[in-house]
C-alpha cells in the first residue's frame, strides 16, 4: 500500500460512525453522573459544609439532565 493509500484510509476511518465501545463508554459515563448526583443529593448539611457546597449549588447540579456535565 502506498503512502497515498494509507493517508486516504486514515482519513476515511476518522469519519466513520462511533464504535460500540465508544457508545458503551458514554452510557457508563452517564450512569456514573446519575449516581454521583444522587449521592450529592443525599449529603447532609454538615457534609456539604465540609466540601464547600451550598444546598442551592447541589440543587442546581442535580437538576441538570444526565447528559450535561
Image (cartoon, rainbow, N blue to C red):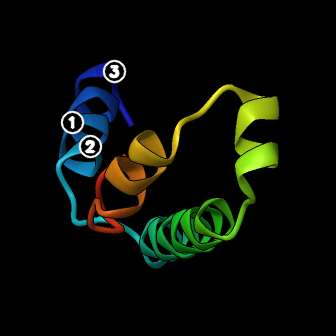
Counting from the top left corner in percent of width and height, residue 62 is at 41, 61
Query: How far apart are the two marked residues, 3 and 2, measured between alpha carbons?
Result: 17 Å
- Relative to 30, 45 lies left or right: right
Q: Going 21% across and 36% down the picture, which residue do you hit?
A: 11
Identify the element where label 2 is drawn: helix
**Which of the labelled discs sits on residue 11, or is there none?**
1
Could you tell me if the residues under marks 1 and 2 are in contact, i.e. CB atoms within 8 Å? yes
To which quarter of the image does residue 67 belong? bottom left
For discs 3 and 1, the disc positioned in front in the rendered view:
1
- Relative to 48, 69 lies left or right: left
Earlier sequence position, callout 3 versus callout 1: 3
Label 2 crowding class (10 Å Cα cut-off): few <14, some 14-19, many 20+?
Answer: few
Could you tell me if the residues under marks 3 and 1 are in contact, i.e. CB atoms within 8 Å? no
Counting from the top left corner in percent of width and height, residue 30 is at 47, 69
Query: How far apart are the two marked residues, 3 and 1, measured between alpha carbons?
Result: 12 Å
Position of the N terminus by quadrant:
top left
**Which of the labelled discs sits on residue 14, or is there none?**
2
Q: Going 34% across and 27% down the picture, which residue do you hit?
A: 2
Disc 3 target residue: 3
In this rendered view, identify the residue nearer to me: 46 or 22. 46
Identify the element where label 1 is drawn: helix
To which quarter of the image does residue 3 belong? top left
Counting from the top left corner in percent of width and height, residue 53 is at 59, 33
Amino acid at each position: 500500500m502506498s503512502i497515498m493509500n494509507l493517508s486516504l484510509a486514515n482519513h476515511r476511518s476518522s469519519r466513520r460512525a462511533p464504535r460500540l465501545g465508544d457508545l458503551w463508554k458514554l452510557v457508563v459515563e452517564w450512569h456514573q453522573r446519575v449516581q454521583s448526583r444522587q449521592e450529592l443529593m443525599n449529603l447532609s448539611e454538615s457534609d456539604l459544609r465540609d466540601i464547600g457546597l451550598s444546598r442551592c449549588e447541589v440543587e442546581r447540579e442535580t437538576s441538570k439532565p444526565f447528559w450535561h456535565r
